[in-house]
Image (tube, rainbow, N blue to C red):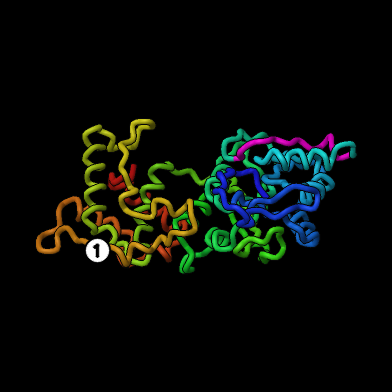
């Protein structure tokens, strides 16, 4: 269970919105409160975390403390972030007066809005609705932690570990793997929780890259939005679209006018609204298929009946130079995306 956002419950008389806990605390499915009840699974998660006796462990969503107890026994200190004040009290009562109490620090609040202190490891069983923002919040944390062991909805987890060519390979995959190495550890059935969620889960291990791969984040994001707008189309088709060419040419001319051909100057980037190209919410929800646009819009070639414009020719030359024109985003590796972006930048074409 996690310290993420609590959404307001809709009043449903007798709708079974929560399940009682034997100690008197009710768990609310609508708030993502699902407590691990399988002790063998808890032991497995702790073992796979590779905890050292000197480690400071960040736990997100400790709930009633089943996992917290094992973490306290294995590490030096546990910092537990919990949004529900009822769970905070339950956690404090559980360890009050025990030798473990002086090694537990509880922070009550929304983990997405909380300034996180230093930690070596993160262990989390989170509400699935905060999966993406929490992942990137952790990956932006400095100094970088050693690893995070996180329970996600299974489909989200499989997106994180997907490889080029996999059905679930998407913008979320590439953005995550740019910053970290991600490994699938184990599948967790819904019956391991109380109350059981509607979906199966998976535990993944996330290891931040050291050193980091340096990119301009706005540029990278704009570039990937275009590439994954229609991930199963060829890059040649994607970059022939009128909307894509118009956006890029506008940015190209703006940068030329600013006399920035030798490189972008920080804080002076001209910004483009890439959300027009689709899949703008793909990282935030599991309801969106990032390739769904294939069935919704037709490809447009701005110069189908005439000679290609000078700028369009410039874009296509970049694709041909790197042998990318007939390749598809769904099958490109992280290294290939980085290389293609560098080729565009070398030609003065930028995405922010």
Indicate the position of residue 104 as horizontal and vertical percent values.
79, 38
In the image, taking residue 321 as reference, residue 196 lies left or right, namely right
Residue 175 image point, x, y percent: 48, 51
Residue lying at the far front in this picture: please name it: 13
> How far from the left and from the top, in percent, is residue 352?
34, 41
Could you tell me which residue is drawn at 15 percent across and 58 percent down? 308
- Asked if residue 86 lies left or right of residue 295, the reply is right
Where 327 sits versus 106, above or below? Answer: below
Q: Residue 41: which quarter of the image?
A: bottom right
Q: Is residue 143 left or right of residue 236?
A: right
Horizontal and vertical percent position of residue 100: 86, 40
Q: Is residue 107 magenta?
A: yes
Q: Residue at x 22, y 43 (%)?
A: 250
Where does the magenta region start and end?
99-111
Task: Identify the residue at image location x=32%, y=39%.
Answer: 271
Q: Nearer the viewer, residue 317 or 288?
A: 288
**Residue 211's quadrant in the figure?**
top right
Q: Residue at x 41, y 60 (%)?
A: 290
Residue 253 visible from this viewpoint: yes
Q: Is residue 152 magenta?
A: no
Evaluate whether residue 130 shows in this view: no
Q: Which residue is mark 1?
A: 299
Q: How many marks?
A: 1
């Amino acid at each position: 269970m996690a310290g993420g956002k609590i959404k307001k419950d809709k009043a449903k008389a007798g709708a079974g919105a929560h399940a009682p806990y034997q100690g008197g605390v009710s768990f609310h499915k609508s708030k993502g409160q699902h407590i691990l009840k399988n002790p063998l699974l808890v032991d497995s998660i702790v073992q796979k975390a590779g905890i050292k006796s000197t480690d400071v462990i960040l736990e997100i969503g400790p709930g009633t403390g089943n996992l917290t107890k094992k973490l306290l026994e294995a590490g030096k200190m546990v910092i537990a972030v919990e949004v529900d004040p009822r769970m905070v009290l339950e956690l404090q009562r559980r360890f009050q007066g025990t030798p473990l109490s002086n090694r537990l620090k509880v922070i009550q609040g929304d983990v997405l809005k909380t300034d996180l202190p230093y930690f070596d490891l993160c262990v989390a069983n989170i509400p699935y609705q905060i999966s993406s923002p929490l992942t990137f919040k952790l990956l932006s944390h400095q100094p970088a932690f050693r690893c995070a062991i996180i329970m996600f909805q299974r489909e989200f987890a499989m997106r994180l570990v997907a490889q080029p060519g996999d059905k679930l390979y998407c913008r979320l995959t590439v953005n995550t793997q740019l910053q970290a190495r991600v490994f699938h550890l184990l599948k967790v059935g819904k019956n391991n929780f109380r109350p059981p969620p509607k979906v199966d889960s998976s535990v993944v291990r996330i290891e931040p890259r050291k050193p980091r791969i340096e990119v301009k984040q706005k540029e990278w994001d704009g570039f990937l939005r275009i590439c994954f707008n229609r991930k199963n189309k060829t890059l040649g088709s994607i970059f022939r679209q009128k909307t894509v060419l118009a956006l890029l040419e506008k940015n190209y001319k703006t940068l030329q006018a600013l006399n920035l051909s030798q490189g972008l100057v920080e804080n002076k980037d001209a910004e483009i609204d890439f959300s027009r190209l689709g899949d703008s919410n793909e990282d935030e929800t599991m309801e969106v298929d990032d390739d769904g646009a294939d069935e919704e819009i037709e490809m447009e070639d701005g110069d189908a009946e005439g000679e290609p414009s000078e700028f369009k020719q410039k874009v296509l030359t970049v694709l041909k130079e790197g042998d990318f024109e007939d390749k598809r985003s769904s099958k490109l590796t992280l290294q290939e995306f980085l290389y293609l972006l560098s080729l565009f930048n070398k030609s003065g074409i930028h995405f922010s």
